[in-house]
Amino acid sequence: MIQLEKLLFEVYTDRDIETEIKHCVILFERAKENGSIKIVARELEKRFYNNPEIIKALNDATNRKVSIDIIFGPTMESGNGELQKLWKEKKINLWYLEKQYPQHFMVIDDFMVIDDRYVRTEELHLPGQIERQGYMYRTSWIGKRLAEDFVKLQTQAKHLSPDKDTLEAI
């Protein structure tokens, strides 16, 4: 029998971005020392990934030796200077997908996995679509499955090096 997982938060991502940011900060803070944060995002929306609270939470996580890997593509919104700074300082890893990745379960789109046990998913949507829902929950089996999917996506993506690559061309 499959155990039901614990839903932590439900949020309408575009309508209530401040609440989503607050909840994601909580998830990032739950990443344990030497843990991991894996993020799949299409265009790295600047209102989220350039938000000072998100940047601080990611930076604090790197200070706890949490590895942070972000897969994005095929586009990136301009104005993500603070996230790019973390990348240039080699605090986070960026992976670029030239083509949109296939949506895994046809019900979720972008996702985050923290220490393979806290998960944030987002409804399947078109870029820029408003009124989509996001869910954040504590899980084990879904977290492990998405972490495995993340590794598969990494094999299809280009690892961007701050020493050799530039994000301006993307």
Image (tube, rainbow, N blue to C red):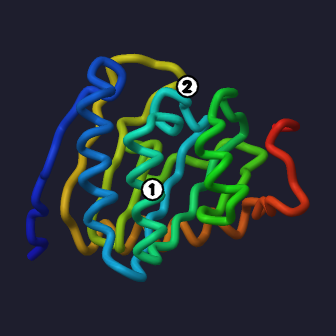
Q: Which residue is mark 1?
A: 58
Q: Hey, which quadrant is residue 46 in on the image?
A: top right
Tell which tag, 2 or 1, sits nearer the viewer.
1
**Which residue is drawn at the image coordinates 64% and 63% (left, top)?**
93
Left/right of residue 60 with respect to residue 73 in the rendered view: left
Give the CA distance from mark 2 to mark 1.
24 Å
Pick the front one: 101 or 35: 35
Q: What residue is drawn where x is 58% and y is 38%?
A: 44
Q: Secondary structure at mark 2?
A: loop
Mark 1 crowdedness (10 Å alpha carbons): few <14, some 14-19, many ≥20: many
Q: Position of residue 32 (x, y in %)?
A: 31, 76
Q: Residue at x 61, y 69 (%)?
A: 152
69 on left or right of 145: right
Amino acid under disc 1? Leu
* Residue 123: % across, % down: 36, 36
Local crowd size for mark 2, using a 10 Å CA cut-off: few (<14), some (14–19), many (≥20): few
Q: Which residue type carries mark 2? A: Pro
Judged left or right of residue 21, residue 65 is right
**Residue 29 against residue 13 in the figure, above or below:** below
Tell me which corner region of the image, top left, top right, bottom left or bottom right, holds residue 6: bottom left
**Considering the image in quadrants, where does the C terminus appear?**
top right
How far across and down, in percent of the image, does residue 81 sit? 65, 37
Residue 10, by quadrant, is top left
| Element class at badge 1 | helix
Is residue 141 or residue 106 the one in the foreground?
141
Nearest to N terminus: mark 2 or mark 1 = 1
Residue 27: assigned label: none
The image quadrant where one finds the N terminus is: bottom left
Mark sitting on residue 127 = 2
Q: In the rendered view, would you say 122 is above or below 67?
A: above
Residue at 53% over, 35% down = 50
